[in-house]
């Protein structure tokens, strides 16, 4: 009798938990914003290169954290490295009701000799995205040259990105620039604004990352207000400057030595609400511009675990951002 009562009580508790989760996570069709993360967290800091990684473990975390999908990085090599053929990925995503939001795409856009190769890769990338129901291509800029050459390299890259936007549009896909603060061509506020002025809003747009905007010294609310109409997707990562006085050891055993830019960058990544970025203001801008699309919680480092951080971020979103706009 006691056992039956215990099982009944457990089932009731589980049912209540599921109802609470359903209430916290409205159906995707009723929301303007879908929430994802980036697979880069797992490939860079979580998984060891010893064959032990299971791609489905990442998908389970994404699902259990209450997210809608993820941005694929390292395409196409990552799927091959972790033994996840496209057909199997389709099945595994369907099981969990998850989606591929977009993919990280790059290349030496400032080097005309590389343009044909990038375009060939872009055709394949767009075909992949179409297969998985995505309409976003997130474009990373190339490595930055000496400061004297930045303006010319950016001009060449922007001319090419307009063509890349046309190419993506032929597949029904929108392309946008993803800023980066660790040695890429588009880092600072003036470089972001110059990129937006040199690209055609009908062809190429903006997919910013808040932690990189923060570390690049940008006025983030100003940029969102001025260029909110150019936003097609974005990364929300809270940030607070924390210099790495000690080595940073990640879950996969890799060590970023104290005092290095990557160790400091890792520590600057914060869960939503723990840093210095006012996401309520940014979310208000999205509402004003009637933004519809993906926001990626692009953590690069999680001191406890990905599930712990993403659940905390999802709770912050539920309490602080969805009342503003969802």
Image (cartoon, rainbow, N blue to C red):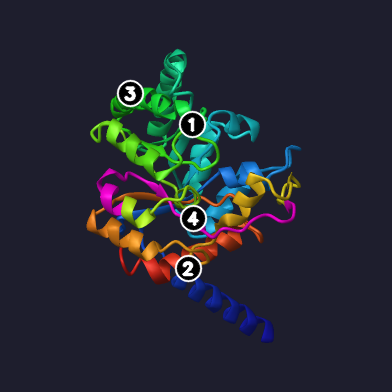
Marks 4 and 2, how far apart in space? 14 Å
Q: SS of the residue at dot 4?
A: loop
Q: Which residue is mark 2?
A: 315
Nearer the observer: mark 3 or 1; the answer is: 1
Q: Earlier in the sequence, mark 2 or mark 3?
A: 3
Q: Which residue is mark 4?
A: 237
Marks 2 and 3, how far apart in space? 41 Å
Q: Earlier in the sequence, mark 4 or mark 3?
A: 3
Q: Which mark is residue 147?
A: 1
Nearer the observer: mark 4 or 2; the answer is: 4
Marks 4 and 3, how far apart in space? 29 Å
Q: Which mark is residue 316?
A: none
Residue furthest front in the image: 148
Which quarter of the rendering shows the C terminus? bottom left
Residue 248 visible within the image: yes
Nearer the observer: mark 4 or 1; the answer is: 1
Which quarter of the rendering shows the N terminus? bottom right
Q: Which residue is mark 3?
A: 159
């Amino acid at each position: 009798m006691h056992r039956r009562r215990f099982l009944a009580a457990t089932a009731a508790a589980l049912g209540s938990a599921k109802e609470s989760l359903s209430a916290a996570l409205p159906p995707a069709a009723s929301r303007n914003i879908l929430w994802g993360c980036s697979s880069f967290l797992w490939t860079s800091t979580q998984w060891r290169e010893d064959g032990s990684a299971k791609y489905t473990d990442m998908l389970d975390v994404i699902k259990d954290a209450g997210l809608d999908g993820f941005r694929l990085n390292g395409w196409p090599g990552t799927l091959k490295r972790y033994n996840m053929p496209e057909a199997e990925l389709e099945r595994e995503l369907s099981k969990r009701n998850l989606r591929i939001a977009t993919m990280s795409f790059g290349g030496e856009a400032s080097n005309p000799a590389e343009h044909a190769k990038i375009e060939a890769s872009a055709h394949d990338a767009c075909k992949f995205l179409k297969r998985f129901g995505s309409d976003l291509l997130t474009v990373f800029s190339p490595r930055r040259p000496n400061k004297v050459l930045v303006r010319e390299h950016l001009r060449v890259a922007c001319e090419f990105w307009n063509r890349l936007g046309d190419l993506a549009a032929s597949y029904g896909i929108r392309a946008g620039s993803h800023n980066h603060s660790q040695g890429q061509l588009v880092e600072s506020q003036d470089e972001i604004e110059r990129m937006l002025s040199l690209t055609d809003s009908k062809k190429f747009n903006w997919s910013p990352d808040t932690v990189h905007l923060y570390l690049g010294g940008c006025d983030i609310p100003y940029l969102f207000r001025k260029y909110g109409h150019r936003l097609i997707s974005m990364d929300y990562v809270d940030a607070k400057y924390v210099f790495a006085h000690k080595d940073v050891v990640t879950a996969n055993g890799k060590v970023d030595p104290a005092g290095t830019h990557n160790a400091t960058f890792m520590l600057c990544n914060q869960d939503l609400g723990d840093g210095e970025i006012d996401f309520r203001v940014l979310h208000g801008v999205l509402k004003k511009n009637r933004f519809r699309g993906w926001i990626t919680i692009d953590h690069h480092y999680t001191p406890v675990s990905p599930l712990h951080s993403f659940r905390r971020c999802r709770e912050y979103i539920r309490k602080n951002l969805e009342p503003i706009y969802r």
